[in-house]
Image (tube, helix red, strand yellow):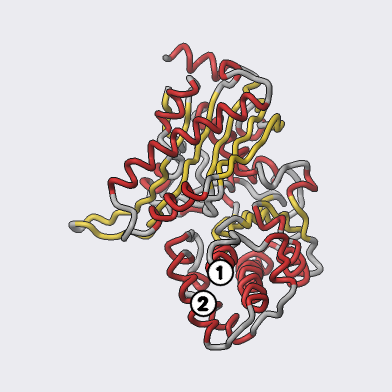
């Protein structure tokens, strides 16, 4: 095993496969990248990417796990191994699509699927306990593929006193932080998060945190109002046909997470099913059309992002540009509203820099796996609140 590890580390270039299922839980992103070097010398080339969509039944199963009332221990146990099979199948699928064989892949980095995240300490018998849970059993992935697999990236940071999120800022630093431009890398997935890099900021100076909901509230409201016929507002067409409602928007902006100081992270526990119910109850007071309601929750996402820039980024650091990734990068209405809100700062997409917005997080977990192989700490204590830098990920050899 030691010889195998040393041989991997000695390779100047590796093919690494990244896997991720995000807070929108719509499918598994799989990416194969060629990685040269590690640390600041890292260079990455995307070789193949595919999103393997979940079936309606699998989405229903995962959604049940988010709710303590339906996510029993038996369901979690079963789903952990079932998702492991799906992740393994996605890995083998993308390998085949790329015209490669499993023997060509040096390493897999799998984030899995987060089903619960409790980063604030809860006392149990006097012991303050932080916790987070990602499933998609890595042992199944390694067994089915025969490839060394790195997974469970969040837990070491949580054990070190951190929030366990966000994890991508280290990757943003490697990909975008090499010149004098102050860039906000804004991911808009189910949850939205930012990373400020560049302008001479080192790893210990990077600013990053979750700004609040990205697509989660928009998707949830669309899904409820269409009785499950639609999962999201495709191309922002529904929001684009409506007008924001100022009173409802003001009410939404009183959410306590938005006033919390960084470092901070959030998830479905704050902006999931219960919050969707709250939004719908509040909207009923105003008898809004579906177009106006979706326009309002889209404006809610935009406003939460912009206000965090104004509070924490612009006064102290300045901001030369914003680069958008994640599913929100494909919502023209959301991007138009954000660009107008923060003008004259330009809003660009990852594609403008040769990086697929869809593949970004899968690429990131491939990079984190490579860094773990070399023993490189990839949490950022200034970002997560951890007591010290730690190496993230567990290895299944």
* x 47%, y 47%: residue: 58
Q: Where is residue 168 in the image (x, y as percent from the top left)?
A: 57, 46
Closer to the camera, 224 or 148? 224
Per the image, the residue denoted by label 1 is 221
Is residue 212 visible in this depiction of the protein? no
Figure quadrant of the N terminus: top left
Q: Position of residue 243 (x, y in %)?
A: 71, 80
Badge 1 crowding class, 10 Å Cα cut-off, few under 14, some 14 to 19, many 20 or more, is many
Disc 1 + disc 2, Cβ < 8 Å:
yes
Residue under numbered circle 2 = 280
Q: Position of residue 89 (x, y in %)?
A: 52, 31
**Cα distance between the residues tagged 1 and 2:** 7 Å
Q: Residue at x 43, y 69 (%)?
A: 274
Please count the marks in the image.
2
Image quarter where the C terminus lies is top left
Label 2 CA crowd tier, 10 Å (few <14, some 14–19, many 20+) = some
Upstream in sequence: badge 1 or badge 2: 1
Visible in this render: residue 223? yes
Query: Does residue 78 appear to the left or right of 29 in the view shown?
Result: left
Examine the image and state in which quarter residue 293 appears: bottom right
Q: Residue furthest top?
A: 3
């Amino acid at each position: 095993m030691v010889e195998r590890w040393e041989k991997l580390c000695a390779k100047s270039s590796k093919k690494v496969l990244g896997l991720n299922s995000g807070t929108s839980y719509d499918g598994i992103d799989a990416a194969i990248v060629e990685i040269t070097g590690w640390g600041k010398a890292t260079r990455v080339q995307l070789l193949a990417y595919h999103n393997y969509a979940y079936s309606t039944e699998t989405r229903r199963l995962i959604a049940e796990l988010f709710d303590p009332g339906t996510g029993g221990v038996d369901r979690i146990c079963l789903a952990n191994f079932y998702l492991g099979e799906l992740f393994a199948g996605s890995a083998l699928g993308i390998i085949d699509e790329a015209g490669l064989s499993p023997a060509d892949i040096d390493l897999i980095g799998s984030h899995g699927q987060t089903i619960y995240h409790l980063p604030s300490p809860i006392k149990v018998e006097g012991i303050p306990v932080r916790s987070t849970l990602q499933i998609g059993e890595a042992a199944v992935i390694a067994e089915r593929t025969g490839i060394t697999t790195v997974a469970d990236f969040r837990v070491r940071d949580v054990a070190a006193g951190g929030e366990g999120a966000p994890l991508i800022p280290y990757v943003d630093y490697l990909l975008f932080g090499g010149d004098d431009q102050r860039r906000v890398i804004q991911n808009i997935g189910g949850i939205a998060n930012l990373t400020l890099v560049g302008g001479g900021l080192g790893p210990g100076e990077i600013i990053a945190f979750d700004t609040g909901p990205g697509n989660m509230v928009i998707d949830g409201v669309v899904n409820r109002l269409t009785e499950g016929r639609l999962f999201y507002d495709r191309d922002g067409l529904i929001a684009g046909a409506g007008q924001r409602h100022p009173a409802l928007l003001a009410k939404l902006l009183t959410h306590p997470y938005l006033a919390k100081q960084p470092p901070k992270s959030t998830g479905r526990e704050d902006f999931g099913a219960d919050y969707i119910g709250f939004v719908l109850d509040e909207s009923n007071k105003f008898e809004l059309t579906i177009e106006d309601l979706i326009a309002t929750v889209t404006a809610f996402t935009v406003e939460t992002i912009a206000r965090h820039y104004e509070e924490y980024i612009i006064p102290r650091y300045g901001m030369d540009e914003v680069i958008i990734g994640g599913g929100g990068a494909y919502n023209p209405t959301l991007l138009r509203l954000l660009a107008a809100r923060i003008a004259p700062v330009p809003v660009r997409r990852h594609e403008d820099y040769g990086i697929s917005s869809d593949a970004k997080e899968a690429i990131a977990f491939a990079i984190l796996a490579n860094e773990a192989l070399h023993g490189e700490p990839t949490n950022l204590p200034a970002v997560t609140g951890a007591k010290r830098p730690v190496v993230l990920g567990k290895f299944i050899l």
